[in-house]
């Protein structure tokens, strides 16, 4: 149960004064659905207004407050704006410009001959100075008008003024909260209490960039992870010590790399323990994680247990199923698949096989988490690309069996060392830091948009030589719809040249449709696959050796790296072309050239972190409950050590979070929606 003190903050934004239907959409879009979300809606910058006596004191572009006298009205045709010609004290002219049909309104605001104090941004329009939709201030509020004002991230239909009002209401609802930060730390950082810091976030431009609010979030995150780990340690698992009979039978056409062998033996060591494993397997795209996972699963099967292998998407689940089936040819292992798409008899029989133990290994999507899915004796679970899953799902899985299964989470997302702890908490980490020998490096080039025709010509030559290629379409922020439109349009254009050799996959497609296209691509019937980022993770088509990414500057580096990893899987030389717009910031340029210079995912991740303070580095903005909303990657890497120590110290002293500070820490867990940590506390 959420502590009562937080209730006002968890109220719906919809219930605030002045929020009608019209605001529902923009609020939703900005993910400001609860009052607390508004509290944490950070100004993107601060606008300064300058008081001037005369217009020539101010530079164009500045927001000013000035006294003027309207001298004349000019209304153009039906399509041009209404203009009020006004003069300052020195007779300098300015045109106050109003768009919209209602000319009565500006006339009423600015009667001719009456001096008025106005505020707005000074602009130049042709030879004239102008101000668009100035605020007209009453003399009484001139004193009140803020000379510095926070400007918030906004959305269509929700302007800054209204946003400010909503935030003010939210701030008014913010209670004093008991302190969860270790007192000595609070003092040494010179941080104020939570409520004061929230207030200053919205009222003080120079709040010396207090990191407290970010720290709170990181602290809650670490604390929750530690609770998971602690509860995991208390749980009983089974000790798995297979005799190797299945693992020995796998016929590999290659030698395992040293890194794979090391990871396999680290995992073996964990499995032999009776406390459940909680381990992360990190390895760049193509480093061979699947095989490492399979060894762990077979170990369990040898010992008479079941294993589960979870993939983030339908496509990947099928691909893994087929890949594993091949590796298991001739072995007495019963492999099955279960996804949301399996219905009726097929599903029933899979469920039965799981319950009676005749299925040894189940591959699937999150469907294998569902209530109805009962295993006979699940002892080993693998989660592929686990950052796509929420923490809560991870926990659900571990609570399925009466003993807790060993858990191996795998990711190809290269994460800087400093951030691993914030994403995976106290998990043990194995790293495959070596690619199988003989891999071709991928030649990466950054190319200006303007050269698109040449790129298409190159593509034509590639296809004529029997090659296959991916074409990834730009990511349009927060709008699945326009992603899709862009991809469809691009596919249509490319079809005019390449005909039905072009296939299209996108996130809105139904599973079977998507798989059908993927299958045709895999079999070479489709030569060019146009896609939105749904191909991001794991898809394996060795003959595809050309990757074209449109508007590459809009992707995160880690994402680009993963996309690029779709090629370079066969033995031919692969190319990756990053198309970019004409205008690129310094940082964007540096980021793209980094990709050109190295194929090392971890190096890319470290550099990316260095190059930008904040951003979508972790790709968590959309991934739900494992994400950080307040702390930037930079803040995470600066504060993680202190937060982790602080959380550990607290739990050492007060493992049940019963003390006054423990209770306060519970509030932090709820505030940041890490309360799954609290439920573990109770169930023990
Ligand atoms: P990822 O780590 O991206 O999941 P995969 O497990 O899909 O990588 O492996 C990529 C490819 O490399 C697969 O085709 C796999 O058979 C192959 N592979 C795995 N291990 C080795 C190895 N030691 N030597 C050569 N090829 C390997
Ligand atoms: Mg993989």
Image (cartoon, rainbow, N blue to C red):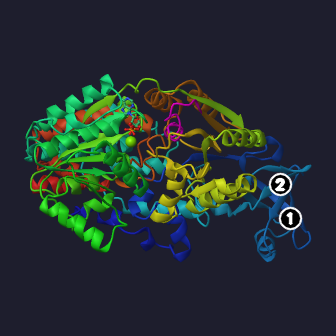
Pointer 1 and pointer 2: residues touching (CB < 8 Å)?
A: yes
The answer to whether residue 595 of the structure is visible from this angle is yes
Q: Residue 681: where, in percent of width, then height?
A: 14, 52
Q: Residue 25: where, in percent of width, then height?
A: 53, 69
Counting residues from the start of the chain, the first of labels 1 and 2 encountered is 1
User: Is 27 located above or below residue 226 in the figure?
Assistant: below
Badge 2: how crowded within 10 Å, few (<14), some, or many (20+)? many
**Residue closest to the eye, 246 or 135:** 246
Quadrant field for ligand 2: top left
Residue for point 77% across, 50% down: 122
Residue 41: mark in rendering: none
Residue for point 49% across, 29% down: 604
Q: Is mark 2 within 8 Å of ligand 1?
A: no
Residue for point 49% across, 50% down: 42
Residue 103 covered by magenta stretch: no
Label 1, label 2: how many angstroms apart (C-alpha)? 9 Å
Q: Quadrant of residue 4?
A: bottom left
Q: Quadrant of residue 271?
A: top left
Residue 130: mark in rendering: 2
Q: Residue 403: where, in percent of width, then height?
A: 9, 52
Q: Is mark 1 within 8 Å of ligand 1?
A: no
Location of mark 1 (residue):
83
Badge 1: how crowded within 10 Å, few (<14), some, or many (20+)? many
User: Is 257 located above or below residue 139 in the figure?
Assistant: above
């Amino acid at each position: 149960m959420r502590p009562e003190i937080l209730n006002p903050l968890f109220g719906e934004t919809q219930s605030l004064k002045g929020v009608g239907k019209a605001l529902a959409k923009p609020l939703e879009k900005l993910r400001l659905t609860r009052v607390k979300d508004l509290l944490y809606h950070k100004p993107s910058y601060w606008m300064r207004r300058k008081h001037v006596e005369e217009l020539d004191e101010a530079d164009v572009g500045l927001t000013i407050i000035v006294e003027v006298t309207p001298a004349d009205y000019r209304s153009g045709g039906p399509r041009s704006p209404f203009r009020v010609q006004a003069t300052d004290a020195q007779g300098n002219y300015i045109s106050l410009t109003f768009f919209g049909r209602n000319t009565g309104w500006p006339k009423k605001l600015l009667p001719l001959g009456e001096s008025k104090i106005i505020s707005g941004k000074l602009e130049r329009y042709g030879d004239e100075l102008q101000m668009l939709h100035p605020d007209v201030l009453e003399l009484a509020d001139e004193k009140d008008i803020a000379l510095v004002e926070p400007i918030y991230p906004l959305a269509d239909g929700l302007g800054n003024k209204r946003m400010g009002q909503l935030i003010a209401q939210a701030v008014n609802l913010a209670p004093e909260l008991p302190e969860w930060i270790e007192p000595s730390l609070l003092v040494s950082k010179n941080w104020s209490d939570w409520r004061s810091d929230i207030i200053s976030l919205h009222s003080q431009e120079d709040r010396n960039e207090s990191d407290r609010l970010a720290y709170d979030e990181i602290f809650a995150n670490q604390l929750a992870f530690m609770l998971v780990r602690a509860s995991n340690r208390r749980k009983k698992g089974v000790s798995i010590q297979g005799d190797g009979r299945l693992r020995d039978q796998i016929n590999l056409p290659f030698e395992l790399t040293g890194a794979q062998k090391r990871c396999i033996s680290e995992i073996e060591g964990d499995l032999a323990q009776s406390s459940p494993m909680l381990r992360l397997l990190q390895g760049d795209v193509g480093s061979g994680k699947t095989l490492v996972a399979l060894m762990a699963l077979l170990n369990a099967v040898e010992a008479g247990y079941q294993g589960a292998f979870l993939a983030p998407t339908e496509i990947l689940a099928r691909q893994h199923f087929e890949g594993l089936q091949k590796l298991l040819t001739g072995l007495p292992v019963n492999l099955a698949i279960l996804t949301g798409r399996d219905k009726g008899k097929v599903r029933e029989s899979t469920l039965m096989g799981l319950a009676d133990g005749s299925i040894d290994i189940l591959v699937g999507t999150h469907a294998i988490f569902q209530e109805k899915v009962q295993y006979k004796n699940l002892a080993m679970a693998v989660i592929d690309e686990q950052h796509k899953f929420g923490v809560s799902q991870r926990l659900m899985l571990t609570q399925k069996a009466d003993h807790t299964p060993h858990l191996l989470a795998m990711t190809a997302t290269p994460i800087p060392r400093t951030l691993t702890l914030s994403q995976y908490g106290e998990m043990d980490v194995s790293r495959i830091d070596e690619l199988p020998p003989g891999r071709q490096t991928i030649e990466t080039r950054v190319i200006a948009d303007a050269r698109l025709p040449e790129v298409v010509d190159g593509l034509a030559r590639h296809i004529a030589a029997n090659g296959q290629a991916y074409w990834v379409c730009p990511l349009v922020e927060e709008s699945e719809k326009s992603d899709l439109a862009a991809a469809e349009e691009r596919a249509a254009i490319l079809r005019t040249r390449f005909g039905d050799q072009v296939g299209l996959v996108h996130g809105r497609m139904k599973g079977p449709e998507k798989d059908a296209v993927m299958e045709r691509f895999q079999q070479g019937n489709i030569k060019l696959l146009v896609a939105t980022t749904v191909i991001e993770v794991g898809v394996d088509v060795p003959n595809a050796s050309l990757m074209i990414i449109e508007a590459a500057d809009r992707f995160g580096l880690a994402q680009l790296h993963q996309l690029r990893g779709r090629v370079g899987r066969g033995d031919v030389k692969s190319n990756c072309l990053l198309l970019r717009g004409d205008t690129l910031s310094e940082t964007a340029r540096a980021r793209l050239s980094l990709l050109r210079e190295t194929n090392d995912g971890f190096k890319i991740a470290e550099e990316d972190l260095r190059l930008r303070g904040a951003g979508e580095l972790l790709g968590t903005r959309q991934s739900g409950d494992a994400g950080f909303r307040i702390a930037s990657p930079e803040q995470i890497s600066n504060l993680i050590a202190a937060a982790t120590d602080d959380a550990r110290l607290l739990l050492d002293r007060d493992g049940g979070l019963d003390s006054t500070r423990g209770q306060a820490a519970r509030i932090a867990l709820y505030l940041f929606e890490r309360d799954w940590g609290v439920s573990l506390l109770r169930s023990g």
